[in-house]
Image (cartoon, rainbow, N blue to C red):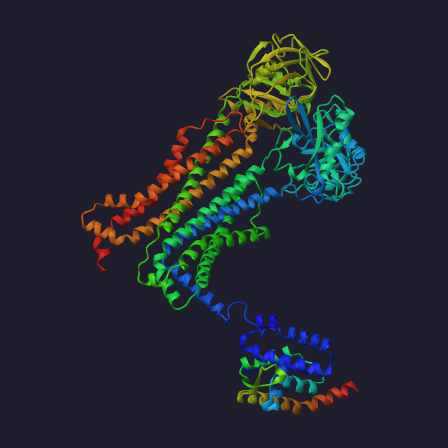
Amino acid sequence: MKKTKLGEFEELVLMTVVVLQENAYGVEIKRELESRLNETLSVGSIQSALKRMEEKSFLTSEFGEATQKRGGKRKRIYKATPYAHKVLQDMKDVRTQLWAAMPAAAAKLNFLMN
Amino acid sequence: MKLLRSVVRKEYLEEIEGDLEEVYADFLEQYSIKKSRRLYNREVLKVLRPALLKPLSGGQKLNYYGMLQHNLLLSVRIFKRYKSSFLINLTGLATGLACVLLIYLWVNDERSIDKFHEKDSRLYQVMGNYHDGADINTWNGMSAQVAGALIAEVPEVEKAISGTDPSWNIGYDLTYQETKVKATGRHVGPDFFNMFSYPLVQGNPDQVLSNKNAIVISEILAKNLFNTTENLIGKTVEWSSMNLGGPVIISGIFSSPPANATDQFDLVLPYQLYADDFGDQWENPNSVAWVLLKEGADLKNVNAKIEGLIRKHLPESNKTLFLQKYSDQYLHGEFENGVEAGGRIEYVRFFSLIAIFILVIACINFMNLSTARASRRIKEVGVKKAVGAGRSSLIFQYLSESMLMSFLSLLVAIGLVFTVLPQFNIITGKQIEPILSSSLIIGGLGITLLTGLISGSYPALYLSGFNPAVVLKGMLKGTVGELWVRKGLVIFQFALSIIFIVGVLVVFKQMQLIQNKALGFDKDQLLYFEREGKTVDNLEPFLQGLKNLPGVENASAINNDMFHPPGVSDFTWEGQLGEQIDIRRQMVYYDFIETLGVTLKDGRSFSRDFPLNKEFQIVLNQKAVELMRLEEPVGKRVKIWGTDALIVGVVEDFHFHSLHESIGPMYFDLAPNFLLNTMVRIKAGSAKEALARMEDFYTEFNPGYTFNYKFLDQDFQELYESENRVAALSRYFAGFAILISALGLLGLVAFSAERRMKEIGIRKILGSGNLRIVYMLSGDFTKMVLAAIVIALPISYYITSDWLTGFAYPIELKWWFFAGAGAVALLVAWLTVGFQTLKAAAVNPVKCLRDE
C-alpha cells in the first residue's frame, strides 16, 4: 500500500488532471484548481506535484502542441494511469465508508455540543 | 530565466518555461507590465523546488549510497584478503594516532593552565627589569608600594594587589583548640578573590580580607581541621609560620584551586599581616603584585606609563616595570634581556612537532603500502575504468578506503589512549581525566580526517591515474618517478627516526651529566627539616643534641631553600666602579659551611668564638671575589642595605643553582634569627640508624611535632623536573616513531619479496644460495636507510647542539651518539628486513614456480 500514498494536494491535482482530460497541462490545471479552490497557486507547486506523481506512476505525460502564447514551447499533457484511477476509487471508497460510519458519531457530537 | 535554466532539470525545462510564459501572458491581460514582471519573477522563484531541480552534481542521479556501500564492501574484502598489510597499517596508524592523541591531550592541558580565571584577559602580573650594566634581569619581586601606586597613578588599572610570591610555598601551621594541621598559604591584598576566580563557598569576596585579623581557608583545609565546612565563619584559629603568628578569625571558605591552576594554596591571610613584619618600603622588593586592567585598556599604553614608576619614587633604582599576562607566565616564563624568551611553550611546540612527525610517519606507511600494492589492484582499476568509472569516483573510492582505515585505527587508538592514560599522567605529572571530552572528540575526529586524507591522497591520485588499456594488458611498469617517491618516503621516515634517536640520546646524556656533576659539595647525605615548636627558640641546644647522636656528622640551620637563594639589590663595596652585581644571599647558622662541606679557601668560617655584633659577617664565594676585584678580601668591609658587613672568609665555588646557569656570585650570611630549616649531614652507610635516632631525639626534644625530613638531593632532582619529564616522554615517542617506521619497512619488504617470488625461485634453481638472495633483497633497503642516515645526522647535530646551548654545562657531542643512532636504525631495518627475506629465501622453488 506504500505506493498509494497520495498527499491531499496531490490528490486534488490528480483529480483535476482526470477532469481536464486532453487539456490537462500545467497552466490549465492551475487555472482549474484556482477557480475551484478559490485561491492562488504557483506554477512551481503544481509542477512539483505533477513530477512527484509522475515518479510515483500516477501520471504519464506526452508533449502536446506549442502555442504563440507559450513562446513556441510545447505543452506537456498529463494523463492519469489506470493505477491512479484505482487509487482514487479506493480513496473514495474509504471515504464513503467513513462517511457512512459518521452519522452516529456526529449525532453524539452534536448532542454533546448542545 | 538563466537561473532557471541552470538549475532545473533539463527534461522539465521546456514544459515549465512554457507554463511560465503562458502565465505571464495571463498576467499581462490583467495587470500592468511592471506588476506582471514582478508576479512572473515570483512564480519563477517558486519553481525552485527540490523535486524539479537538478541533483547537486552531474547530469544524472548517481547512486551514492550504492557506491559507498560498494566501496566499503570492497575495502573490507581487501582488508580480509591481505591480512598482514591490513594489520601493519592498523597497528601503525593506531599507534601513531594514539601518540598524537596523547600529545594533543597534553598540549591542550598545558594551554589550559591558569586560563580558568573569568577575568583572565585582563589579569596581569607586574614584572620588573633590573638593568645591571649591560644585562637585564627579569624578576617579579616588587615592593608592596607598587600596587597602591598603580591604582593611584595609572587610570587604566581597575584593581591591583600585593601578595607574597606563590613560588615561596611557605609552610603554615593552623591550630584550632587541640588540632593542628600544616598548610601552604599566601598573604594577599584585599581584592584577591575579586581578581582571581577561586570561588568562595562562604563569605563575600569584597569583605573576606578587609579585616587584618581575617583568614580564608580552603574546603579541604576546613575538613582537615574541623571535619566540616559548616558554621565556621567567625571561629578563631591560631596561625604560625616560622616565628610569626597569632589568632585570626575565619571570614570565608574557598573551594580549593583546580588542578590546572599553577597557584595551589590552602589558606589566605591579609597582606597587611606580612607587611607589618617585613615592611613595605620602596626599597624592599619582598612581594609580588597583580593587576586587573579596565575593559579595553591598551597594554602598550599601560606599559609605557608604568615603566618609570619605581624611579619616580626611588630615583636611584635601576628597575623598570612592565606587565605580563597572568596566564602567560606558565608557558612564557623565561626572559632574556627583558624580553620574553619562551619557557614551557618550547616543550609544547616541541611535542606538537613530534606529534606531526609521528603522524606523518604513520601516514607514509599507509601510502607506501597502498601504492606498492597497486599492482594487485591494477586489474580492478583497469576494469572499473573500462566500464566507465570516472577518475573522480576512483579517487573517491580510495579516499573512502583510507578514511575507513583511519577511523578503525581511531577506535583502536582511543582504546590505547584510555589504557595508558594513568601511566601517562604519572610520567607527565598531570591529571588528565580519561573521559571522552568534547575537545578529545573534536581533536580526534579532526586528526583522523586529516590522517585519512593525507594517507589516502597519494594512492588515490596515483592509482586512479592508470591508463586502462595498458593496465589490462598487464604491462604496468613503475615509472622511475613513482619509485623515487616511495623510496623518498622511506628515507624520510628513517631520517626522522634517526633524529629522534639522537635527540633522546643527547637529552639522556645531558640529564645524566647534570645529576652526577660534582657540585662542589656532597649533596647525598644531607637532609633538612622545618624548625618549629621548641626548636625555634632553643636552636643551640637542639643542634648540639643532634650532633651528639651517633651517625650524625654535623648540623646547622639555613634560611630557606638551598637551591633558590634570594638576590640582594643593595650591595656595595670599596673600589666599586659603578657596576652592580647580581649577588645571591644564603642566610645560615654556625657550622653551616662545614655541614654543607664546601671548601674554605681563605679566612675562617662562622664561629661561635666570633659572635654577631653590630655588623654582618659574611663569607663570599670565589666568583664574588673575582667580580668585585678584591685583592685581599678577608677583613675588608662591604655595605649591604647600608649596613657594614665584614668579610670573614672565602669559599671555593660550588653550584647553588640549577645547572642551566653557571655559578654566580653569592655569600653566606650569619643570621641566627631568620632560619627556617635545620640541616643535618649524616654519615654515609648508616642512614637508617641515624634517622631512627634523630626521630627519637626530635620527638623527645619537641613533643607534639612530627619529624618530617627531606633529602637535599630530592630538591636537586626537582630542579630538573620538567627536563626529566620531557626526557621520559620523548623516549617513549621516539620508540614509537621507530616502531612505526619499522612496521612500514616490514610491509614493504614482505610485499617486494612476494612480488619477486618467481625471480627467487628461478635464482634458486640456477644455484643461488639463501644468503645471496637475502643480500639481494635487503640491499635496496640498506641503501635507503644509509641515505636516511646521511640526511639525518647533520640535521640532528644542528638541533641537539642548539638545545645544549641552553645549559651552562653542556655535554660534548660525541661522534658515537650519531654513529650509534645510525647503527640502531640500520639494525632495526636489518632485523625487520632480514626476517622477511630469510623467509622468502627459504621457500621451496618448486612451490613458487609450479603454477606456470
| On-image quarter of the C terminus of chain B | bottom left
Q: Position of residue B715 (x, y in %)?
A: 57, 28
Looking at the image, residue B464 lies above or below residue A19: above
* Count of labels in the image: 0
Looking at the image, residue B573 lies above or below residue B370: above
Q: What residue appears at the point 42 percent right and 64 percent down from the top-left corner?
A: B73
Q: Report if residue B647 is visible in the image.
A: yes
Q: What residue appears at the point 40 percent right and 59 percent down from the top-left corner?
A: B465
Q: What residue appears at the point 44 percent right and 48 percent down from the top-left corner?
A: B362
Displayed quadrant of residue B306 = top right
| On-image quarter of the N terminus of chain B | bottom right
A65 vs B474, left or right, is right
Q: Report if residue B177 is visible in the image.
A: no
Displayed quadrant of residue A94 = bottom right
Q: Position of residue B507 (x, y in %)?
A: 48, 33
- The one nearer the camera, B852 or B192, is B852
Q: Position of residue B765 (x, y in %)?
A: 19, 51
